[in-house]
């Protein structure tokens, strides 16, 4: 079928909508509801991929404008390379999550799988439509639909933790929506239209442009989970079902990054250098704080959620560098920054989706997210262990996986920032590189801890000891994601031109010039691209060469060490003797103690809880005032009136008949007049 990209996108939204409705209609036939949700999710994801890839490859812009039901807002859709990149990430992860959910959702039978399928598909449909929407009115409607659908997924478990997490998420998400609405209203007041094209034509500058940018930065930043607006994320994402957590952490937070780029770069043009410096600073702080807080967690899904804050920070480092390049009229710096941000956005969607699916498989079989109660799962869940290890290597930016390539581009962009003639940029570049290097080291430690505590050593609970491998659809989804991480790393030379098209659309440069500029950086005299296939071959061949040399020297095959119990000073080793999650990270927690204390101060949960308690107490005090001022005086007056007319009631039936006759005579006299 030959359809235009926007037609494929519309078909994808319709398929997601059909999946949502069928899940609800088949709620009582739970097996059919699960199948409908998954099959329509997979079909919609395939259509989304068909819509995004041609636009990314060609670098063209597809646009559609129609009269909508409201006279003040056109129904405008625009699929440019930036929107196509988001659509690619959403569709790829949706395909994997839908396949994974086909088995995973069976755990929720009897608890409303039809409603879960409805909200999951509605959530995906709203994200898919949102990235292509080019009118502020419809953009906000879909943004709100995305927030509400994800809110119901967060509170799906209906326990106290999930409800509290959902309440916090609801408040912060809607506070962000108010800021975004204010930014769009300011643009509307200047342009007289809600179309983004009219916003682009404004060419705003000065304080008004800065006000719009700051409103959009913090409004969309709340959805992205950037520091210090990240407090909802480590509570909300772990509370949702794992396939929904993968989508929320893998792609929903990227809608926030998309909004920042859409307003700050596409609409406003990133005219002020301090905008880029601010994004760079927030990105560095988010990266370091996110990985530090991840390192301290022993709940696996909370660790992954904090890691999302870290990776959003890394993406913002690239966005900040790109904005600085535009403001300083350095097209190559701008291209490097946006290529780094776009590549890491796609990479993080896949490896964080894989890691959340791995955590869901552990929860599915071992019935715990607490790493203190896991251990020894590699022998019992080998395919899950392999997939989780691949995701861990990718998120730690180790070659030949995809995380290495995007962080390599990020380092190159930050190095280019440090070559600028201005003092602020020459200082910001090295500082950001140091923060990124520190983030990388701590991320490696965090995922050594996560993998080691879950999959290595001896089981530390009965469920961990009795765990078995995840069902086939879940394994298939994780292995496909792991393969994608390897292909995006080894195939960097094929993926980078797609990211160059995204950068070219944002910098208004020719895609060919951006691609050529990425090959050799004239200011650095260094190659910005590395040969990932060669690196992969070297990484595989070097250990083999070492083994071959050892076997030649020994003249025989290496003897395998006999497996036995670990030595424990003459005692039989027990699971409680192994190092736990907190013990492993205790030195880092001690070293960065002030930053850990800062977490409690930055978290909005305590403040919102206190504010809610004060509101309830104030309402409790205000309610008697109403009673004393209005209700009680009326009641006392009615009581006094009743006491005065009480003499009319004597209990004599004849007297009551007399009252009726008198009333009828009075009515006759009134009628006679």
Image (cartoon, rainbow, N blue to C red):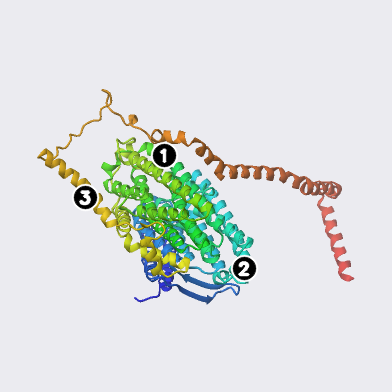
Find numbered disc 2 in the image and state the secondary structure of the residue it sits on.
Answer: helix
Q: Nearer the viewer, mark 3 or mark 2?
A: 3
Residue 350 position within the rendered picture, expressed as x and y whole percent measured from the top left: 37, 55
Q: Which residue: 64% across, 69% down?
A: 190
Tell me the CA gap for discs 1 and 2. Answer: 47 Å
Q: Which mark is residue 85?
A: none
Q: Which mark is residue 298?
A: 1
Asked whether, in this view, residue 554 is left or right of residue 348, the answer is left
Q: Which mark is residue 188?
A: 2
Q: Nearer the viewer, residue 91 or 134?
A: 134
Q: Nearer the viewer, mark 1 or mark 3?
A: 3
Residue 375 position within the rendered picture, expressed as x and y whole percent measured from the top left: 32, 38
Q: N-terminal of the two: label 1 or label 3?
A: 1
Callout 1–callout 2 Cβ contact below 8 Å: no
Callout 3–callout 2 Cβ contact below 8 Å: no
Find numbered disc 3 in the image and state the secondary structure of the residue it sits on.
Answer: helix
Residue 222 in view (yes/no):
no
């Amino acid at each position: 079928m030959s359809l235009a990209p926007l037609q494929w996108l519309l078909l994808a939204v319709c398929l997601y909508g059909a999946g949502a409705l069928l899940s609800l209609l088949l709620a009582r036939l739970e097996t059919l509801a699960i199948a409908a949700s998954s099959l329509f999710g997979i079909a919609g994801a395939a259509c989304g991929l068909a819509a995004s890839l041609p636009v990314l490859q060609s670098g063209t812009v597809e646009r559609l404008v129609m009269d909508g039901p409201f006279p003040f807002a056109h129904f405008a859709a625009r699929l440019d390379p930036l929107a196509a990149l988001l659509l690619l990430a959403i569709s790829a992860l949706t395909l994997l999550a839908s396949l994974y959910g086909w088995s995973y959702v069976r755990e929720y039978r009897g608890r409303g799988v039809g409603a879960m399928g409805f909200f999951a598909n509605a959530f995906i449909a709203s994200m898919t439509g949102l990235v292509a929407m080019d009118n502020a009115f419809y953009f906000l409607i879909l943004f709100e639909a995305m927030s509400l659908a994800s809110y119901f997924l967060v509170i799906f478990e209906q326990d106290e933790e999930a409800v509290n997490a959902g309440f916090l998420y609801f408040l912060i998400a809607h506070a962000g929506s108010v800021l975004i609405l204010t930014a769009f209203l300011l643009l509307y007041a200047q342009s007289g239209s809600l179309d983004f094209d009219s916003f682009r034509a404004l060419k705003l500058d000065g304080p008004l442009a800065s006000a719009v940018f700051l409103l959009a930065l913090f409004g969309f930043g709340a959805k992205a989970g950037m520091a210090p607006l990240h407090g909802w994320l480590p509570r909300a994402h772990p509370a949702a079902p794992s396939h929904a957590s993968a989508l929320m952490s893998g792609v929903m937070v990227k809608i926030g990054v998309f909004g920042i780029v859409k307003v700050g770069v596409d609409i406003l043009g990133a005219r002020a250098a301090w905008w880029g410096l601010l994004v760079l600073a927030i990105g560095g702080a988010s990266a370091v704080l996110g990985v530090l807080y991840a390192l301290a967690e022993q709940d696996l899904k909370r660790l992954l959620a904090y890691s999302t804050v870290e990776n959003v920070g890394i993406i913002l480092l690239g966005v900040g560098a790109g904005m600085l390049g535009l403001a300083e009229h350095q097209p190559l710096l701008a291209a490097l920054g946006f290529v780094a941000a776009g590549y890491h956005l796609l990479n993080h969607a896949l490896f964080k989706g894989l890691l959340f699916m791995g955590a869901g498989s552990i929860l599915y079989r071992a019935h715990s997210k607490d790493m203190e109660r896991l251990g020894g799962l590699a022998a019992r869940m080998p395919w899950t262990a392999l997939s989780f290890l691949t995701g861990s290597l990718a998120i730690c930016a180790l070659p030949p996986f995809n995380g290495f390539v995007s962080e390599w581009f990020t380092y190159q962009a930050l190095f280019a920032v440090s070559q600028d003639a201005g003092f602020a940029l020459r200082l910001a570049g090295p500082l950001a590189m140091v923060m990124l290097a520190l983030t990388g080291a701590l991320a490696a430690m965090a995922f050594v801890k996560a993998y080691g505590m879950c999959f290595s050593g001896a089981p530390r609970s009965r469920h961990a000891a009795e765990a078995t491998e995840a069902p086939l659809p879940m394994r298939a989804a994780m292995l496909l994601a792991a393969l994608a991480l390897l292909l995006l790393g080894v195939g960097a030379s094929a993926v980078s031109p797609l990211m160059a098209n995204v950068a070219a659309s944002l910098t208004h440069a020719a895609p060919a010039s951006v691609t050529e500029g990425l090959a050799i950086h004239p200011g650095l005299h260094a190659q910005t691209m590395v040969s990932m296939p060669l690196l992969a071959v070297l990484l595989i061949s070097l250990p083999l060469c070492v083994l071959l040399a050892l076997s030649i020297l020994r003249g025989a095959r290496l003897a395998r060490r006999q497996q036995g119990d670990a030595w424990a000073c003459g005692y039989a080793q027990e699971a409680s003797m192994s190092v736990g999650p907190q013990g492993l990270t205790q030195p880092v927690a001690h070293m960065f103690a002030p930053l850990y204390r800062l977490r409690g101060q930055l978290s909005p949960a305590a403040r919102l809880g206190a504010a809610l308690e004060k509101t309830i107490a104030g309402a409790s005090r205000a309610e008697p005032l109403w009673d004393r001022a209005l209700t009680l005086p009326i009641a006392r007056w009615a009581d006094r009136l009743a006491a005065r007319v009480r003499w009319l009631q004597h209990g004599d039936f004849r007297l009551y008949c007399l009252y009726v006759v008198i009333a009828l005579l009075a009515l006759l006299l009134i009628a006679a007049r």
